[in-house]
Amino acid sequence: MLLVIDVGNTNTVIGIYNGKELVKDWRIRTVNTITEDEFNIIAVNLFTGSDIKSKDISSIVISCVVPPLVSVLDSFCRKYLGQHPLWVDAKSVNIMPILYNNPDEVGADRIANSVAAFEKYKTSLIVVDFGTATTFDAVSEDGEYLGGAICPGIMISVEALFLKASKLPRVEIFSHPEKIIGKDTASSIRSGIIYGYAGLVDGIVRRMKIEMGTAPKVIATGGVSDLMADVCDSIEEVEPSLTLEGLRIIYEKIGKGKNNCKRSRNVEIRN
């Protein structure tokens, strides 16, 4: 089995693949101060609850945008799983040309998203990932990573509003209002945030399409992708597991057989 881990600024998503099948996935909070021992406790509990044994994990691939956790997860993999994980970055992923001025600046999750999207659709693409930040990634018809845009995520925007406007009540935004014109403060806030953010997404996508000079397919992923797909005119498809799928594809194409993915000797495998 293949263990895939996508470490984001807010959440960490863990998945188990058996071949091309995503057997199970979990979403946990990202904690910058966690230790490898604490991460193992969480992982073992998740595996046990789904009848997955650590000894059955034969390979690991990780994307991480939180630098302090790189050494922690590397230690976890070596200490408890006996594995040297494949780390995804611009240097390790040679299956997609990255046309950034400095390829090392491209987040591992953005690379994984772009690889997975192009592998499935084989056309020019714009990938919108609704995470802590909302990222827009452009992929050419030839499968080149062209670049993109980054803006504050919807939850960051919400928190900033409540922080700076203390009189406004906190409201849940996980459903969109039926009407744009709100009849009370809560519905007005919800309308402004959701439809305002939809306007931001559609506006950036429209400008990116013009600059690309093609008709790219627009797909979305990330925590609120389903919600935003309902109100954004530009989003055509939602791929909830896009990043995990990208990690699997990257491992399948470049990770198999590499020494850095082999099981270490003399390591006690728990669970």
Image (cartoon, rainbow, N blue to C red):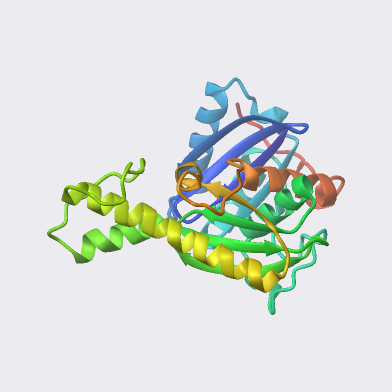
Q: Which quadrant of the rendered structure holds the N terminus?
A: top right
User: Which residue is more in the foreground, 184 or 243?
Assistant: 184
Return the residue found at the far top.
Answer: 51
Return the residue found at the far left.
Answer: 167
Q: Residue at x 28, y 44 (%)?
A: 172
- Residue 95, how many percent across, how many down? 82, 58
Q: Is residue 167 left or right of residue 97?
A: left
User: Which residue is more in the foreground, 25 or 183?
Assistant: 183
Q: Height in image: 75 above or below 140? A: above
Q: Is residue 126 left or right of residue 72?
A: right
* Residue 153 is at least partly visible in this image: no
**Residue 108 location, quadrant:** bottom right
User: Which residue is more in the foreground, 114 or 125?
Assistant: 125
Q: Height in image: 52 above or below 207? A: above
User: Which residue is more in the foreground, 208 or 148?
Assistant: 208
- Residue 242, how many percent across, how many down? 64, 45
Q: Which quadrant of the rendered structure holds the C terminus?
A: top right
Q: Residue at x 43, y 51 (%)?
A: 31
Return the residue found at the far right.
Answer: 257
Q: Height in image: 13 above or below 193? A: above
